[in-house]
């Protein structure tokens, strides 16, 4: 899927796959924070429609 | 001329020349009517229950029918370059009961193989008579060509044939009109886009591989070259010979090498065209813009999915369930799901772009996604019974016979 995202001209870092068990609350929050930070750095997606915040 | 081959002598790997015994079949069918004779014999003797053929309406129109009527098979005879239908799509659980035989160009054959892997048809009960194919033409393009280049009306045409790189139309007044295909294609006419970069011209994945390539001069137009690819193919031929429908002789070395030569020339042309059409777009932003622009006219009618011979999902499918026009910001989500879904199975048959009402060159887009993935797994869909890479349970299953391992991570 990552290579396909790349072929489409999107950043492959936008797609992340993690296995987190229901008992790993801390890991879950860490991953979400990391992904959010990663996406923030990449900036808005080129697929985002104009005029949507 | 060498001796007639006895039915019981036919075995896998044989390269033969054959024709129909009946004068009528010979005159109706192309190249001596061997394929028609084999199909008719299979029905007549009860070897298969039904055959799937194209029922001819005119030179430019035909529709697929399942039939047990030998007469209908005889009426379907002859090549039809202007009816680029993929018969494999019609083989599904609702229609497939008992033994079925069908004539199939390489893309039909590849679709049959892929459909068998997805359990919509039984490979044991499906007899595929492969036909060599240098390309087919969209009926609309044919009409345009006739008007603009040949200055003929479609109603004047009696027949058509591709001979020595020229597209020849025979008119009802008995005249021949020939124009080199290269000249037509330089004008954007000629064969379908997907045929021009097609990579399989001789259907070695079928049970029999038939065609007029490799037929010596004295038999030209009167004989068919056939290679027996599987035991099922040998059974079909034996049946036709025993029933007295077809006669076969061994092909000579000259014919065999001539066939290879034509195949090589055709593949070379495809390779060249492929390099042109699929020139890589290095910059990610430009790639995105390319896909966005190509897909911007998509109206989500779903015709490309409905006609796709390797898609076996039916009504409930990921591409339709997980996409709506409202969610498709700037680019069709429907196609993005399909790009992924077909990346291991797209055979580039061109059906999707034939039916697209927005005239998007869809096959190019699908192939752009599929070819790198198929290369990565060294998997060519429809050419063998190997499990599709995404269905493989163990990484070892994706190792090919040459030995080097799978590149999945």
Image (cartoon, coloured by chain):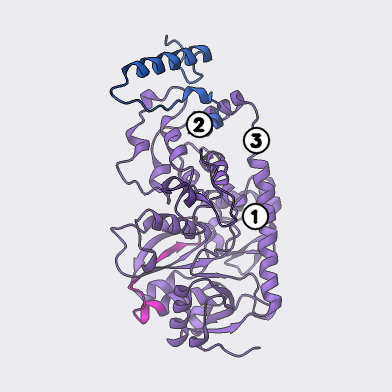
Residue B365 located left or right of residue B73: right
Residue B65 located left or right of residue B373: left
List the residue tagged with mark 3: B280
Say above or below: B135 vs B365.
below
Report the chain shown in purple: B
Q: Position of residue B188 (x, y in %)?
A: 64, 45
User: Is residue B86 visible to us here?
Assistant: no
Discs 2 and 1 carry the same chain letter: no
Q: Position of residue B45 (x, y in %)?
A: 36, 82
List the residue tagged with mark 1: B150
Most foreground residue, B157 or B333? B333
Magenta-tinted stretch: B42-60
Q: Position of residue B364 (x, y in %)?
A: 56, 41
Discs 2 and 3 carry the same chain letter: no
Which of pointers 3 and 1 lies earlier in the amino acid sequence? 1
Q: Secondary structure at mark 2?
A: helix
- Gap between marks 2 and 1 measured at Cα: 49 Å
């Amino acid at each position: 899927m990552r290579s396909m995202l790349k072929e489409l001209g999107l950043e492959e870092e936008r797609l992340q796959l993690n296995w987190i068990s229901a008992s790993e609350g801390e890991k879950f929050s860490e991953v979400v924070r990391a992904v959010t930070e990663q996406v923030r750095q990449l900036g808005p997606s080129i697929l985002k429609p104009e005029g949507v915040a | 001329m060498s001796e007639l081959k006895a039915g019981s002598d036919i075995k896998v790997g044989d390269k033969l020349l054959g024709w129909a015994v009946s004068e009528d079949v010979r005159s109706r069918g192309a190249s001596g009517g061997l394929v028609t004779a084999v199909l008719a014999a299979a029905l007549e003797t009860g070897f298969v229950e039904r055959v799937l053929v194209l029922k001819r309406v005119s030179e430019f129109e035909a529709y697929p029918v399942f039939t047990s009527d030998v007469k209908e098979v005889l009426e379907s005879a002859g090549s039809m370059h202007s009816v680029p239908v993929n018969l494999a799509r019609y083989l599904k659980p609702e229609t497939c009961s008992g033994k079925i035989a069908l004539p199939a160009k390489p893309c039909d054959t590849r679709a049959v193989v892929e459909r068998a892997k997805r359990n919509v048809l039984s490979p044991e009960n499906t007899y595929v008579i492969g036909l060599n194919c240098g390309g087919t033409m969209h009926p609309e393009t044919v009409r345009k060509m006739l008007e603009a280049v040949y200055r003929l009306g479609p109603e004047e045409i009696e027949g058509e044939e591709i001979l020595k790189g020229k597209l020849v139309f025979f008119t009802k007044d008995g005249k021949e009109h020939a124009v080199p295909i290269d000249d037509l294609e330089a004008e954007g006419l000629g064969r379908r886009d997907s045929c021009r970069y097609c990579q399989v011209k001789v259907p070695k994945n079928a049970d029999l591989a038939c065609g007029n390539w490799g037929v010596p001069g004295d038999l030209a137009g009167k004989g068919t070259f056939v290679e027996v690819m599987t035991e099922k193919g040998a059974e079909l031929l034996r049946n036709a010979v025993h029933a007295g429908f077809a006669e076969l002789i061994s092909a000579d070395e000259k014919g065999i090498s001539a066939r290879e030569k034509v195949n090589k020339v055709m593949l070379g042309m495809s390779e060249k065209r492929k390099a042109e059409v699929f020139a890589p777009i290095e910059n990610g932003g430009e790639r995105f813009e390319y896909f966005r622009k190509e897909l911007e006219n998509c109206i989500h009618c779903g015709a490309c999915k409905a006609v796709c011979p390797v898609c076996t999902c039916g009504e409930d499918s990921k591409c339709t369930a997980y996409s709506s026009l409202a969610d498709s910001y700037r680019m069709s989500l429907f196609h993005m799901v399909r790009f992924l879904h077909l990346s291991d199975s797209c055979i580039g048959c061109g059906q999707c772009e034939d039916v697209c009402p927005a005239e998007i060159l869809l096959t190019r887009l699908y192939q752009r996604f599929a070819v790198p993935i198929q290369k990565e797994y060294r998997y060519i869909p429809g050419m063998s019974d190997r499990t599709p890479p995404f269905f493989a349970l163990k990484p070892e299953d994706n190792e090919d016979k040459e030995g080097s391992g799978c590149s999945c991570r």
